[in-house]
Image: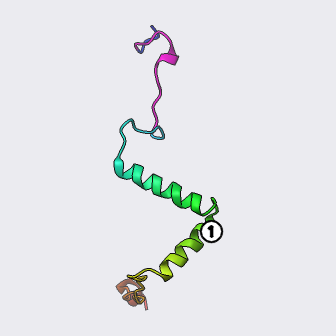
Amino acid sequence: MNGVGFERASEARLRNSWEPEMWEDPIVEETRAARAELVEQAGESIHAFFEYLREREKHDIEGVVTLPPNAPEPSMRHVASR
């Protein structure tokens, strides 16, 4: 043993946050499948993908929500320094 309970250091499996989890989430799988289909339809081109989204927005029944800009309220910190 090498002092940490393993015969060799290679037996101690390192774990990091980049490794996929063992469980599968059906919502994540559905999202990934939809993404793969959209990417395939766009010919794997990001430009074609966004053009598709712009065309879809034009024909969307609910439309695109555009809100008027909000002017920020003046800060008391800036008023006090004048």
Where 21 falls versus 47 (above or below)?
above
Image position of 71 (left or right of 50): left
Q: Which of 59 and 31 is in front in this view?
A: 59
Q: Position of residue 48 (x, y in %)?
A: 62, 68
Residue at (35, 48) in percent of width and height: 26
Q: Which residue lies furthest to the bottom in this view?
A: 82
Per the picture, the main secondary structure of the magenta-coloured stretch is: loop
Magenta-tinted stretch: 5-16
Q: Name the residue under label 1.
A: 48
Q: Residues within 10 Å of mark 1 (few under 14, many from 20)?
A: some
Q: Where is residue 21 in the image (x, y as percent from the top left)?
A: 40, 38
Residue at (60, 63) in percent of width and height: 42
Q: Where is residue 20 in the image (x, y as percent from the top left)?
A: 44, 39
Q: How is the image coloured?
A: rainbow
Image position of 44 (left or right of 30): right
Image quarter where the C terminus lies is bottom left
Q: Which of 28 and 18 is in front in this view?
A: 28
Image quarter where the N terminus lies is top left
> Dot 1 lies on which element?
helix
Magenta highlight on residue 10: yes
Query: Residue 76 sits in which quadrant?
Result: bottom left
Q: Which amino acid does label 1 sit on?
A: Ala
Residue at (58, 57) in percent of width and height: 40
Q: Position of residue 73 (x, y in %)?
A: 36, 88
Query: Residue 65 sits in which quadrant?
Result: bottom left
Magenta highlight on residue 68: no
Where 2 falls versus 77 (above or below)?
above
Query: Residue 68 sits in which quadrant?
Result: bottom left
**Picture mark count:** 1
Where 10 falls versus 17 (above or below)?
above
